[in-house]
Image (cartoon, helix red, strand yellow):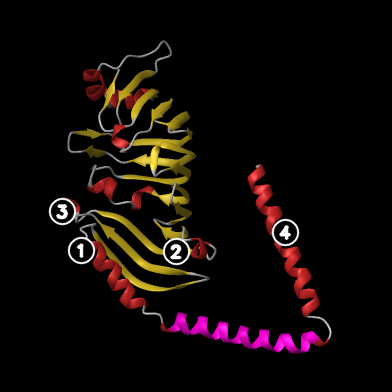
Amino acid sequence: MNIKKVIKINKVINIFKVAYSFFKDKFTGENSKKVLPKIAYAGCFLISFVFFVILTFPYDSLKTRIMYEFSARQMGILSISGLSYAFPFGLKFLGMEYYGTDSMKDVEFLKANYIKVRQSLFSLFTGKIDLSFSSALYSGKSNGRIQLKKDGGRLYINTKNIEFGEYSPLSQLFGLKVTGRLNAMCDIEDQGFNISKSNGEIDINIENFIMEESSFLSLFRLPKLTIQSISGKAKITNGLLKVDTITLTGGDINGTANGEINLRHPFNNSILDLQVRFMFSSVYQEKLKSILDPLNIKQDPGGFYVMNIGGTAGLPRLK
């Protein structure tokens, strides 16, 4: 625990001590008979008011307005089947679906059973945005937090058991038929809303990844591929993303990837410096012979293919 957090905790403890000393004298003896009924009346009024707001809030009007704004601002097509209250200070979006714009208007980028969004009560008095969310989507769960202030923000997302096969864009855009379970964590904080000054960490784990025989971007056909586990960790320090190791094990391919990405704004301008090493099983390599041979990828003494990737995120190239 850092010093700043310790100081904040001590301040909160001191505030509670002062408040306890004040109310201890007020709520003892004869004073309690005068004060407690007033507190009870105020409490009843507050609870009644909260219930009144919850029961009479125009959820349908707000739902319609949100969907209209997405369409009017050409941000895509958003569909919400229902909107209700989420305890203590939030909203619950039911049956949410989001589609792209123009040529991608039929691509379903998001489909969630529900998404709960809650506003921090303390942030209402500071003028900052502090939203926490939880959702059920693609047979899994996801939760996180979004914090925005004048000098930057923080994004935290934690996903569990997300099923790849239910995410439509993989098949609609890339022609890939895949299954697998994703568990991931992302915690990134930036300064001035610029990723080149960001800090954080990323942790990804995919189990039982299977790609059925597919036509990738209609360019060439890929045979069925199975990978038992894909895991990776990365840390971001002052805009430099260091990939510790991405590991692929079991099934038709084994390999590793590591290196750096110098983050830039926009992300397409980020500079890549990565090395990828991989080896296919003998059976799978024979199936890929017609694709691998023209690429002329060099192999190390251990039989691993080695690729050094440079350029930018928008235009990567082999070194």
Quarter containing the N terminus = top right
- Between disc 1 and disc 2, the foreground one is 1
Residue found farthest to the top? 301
Q: Position of residue 103 (x, y in %)?
A: 15, 51
- Between disc 4 and disc 3, the foreground one is 4
Q: Tag 3: residue type?
A: Asp
Earlier residue among tags 4 and 2: 4
Q: Position of residue 55 (x, y in %)?
A: 45, 83
Q: Residues within 10 Å of mark 1 (few under 14, many from 20)?
A: few
Q: Which residue is mark 4?
A: 13
- Between disc 1 and disc 4, the foreground one is 4
Q: Position of residue 89 (x, y in %)?
A: 50, 70
Give the CA distance from mark 3 to mark 2.
28 Å
Q: Tag 1: residue type?
A: Ala
Q: Which residue is mark 3?
A: 102
Earlier residue among tags 1 and 4: 4
Q: Tag 2: residue type?
A: Val
| Residue 130 in the figure: left or right of residue 60 | right
Q: Are marks 4 and 3 in contact (CB under 8 Å)?
A: no
Q: Which residues are magenta?
A: 31-55
> Element at badge 1?
helix
In the displayed structure, 223 sits above or below 69; it is above
Q: Which mark is residue 72?
A: 1
Kindly identify the residue that appears in the image at 41 percent across and 35 percent down: 227
- Between disc 1 and disc 3, the foreground one is 1
Q: Is residue 117 shown to the viewer in this render?
A: yes
Kindly identify the residue that appears in the image at 35 percent across and 67 percent down: 95
Earlier residue among tags 3 and 2: 3
Q: Nearer the viewer, residue 260 or 299?
A: 260
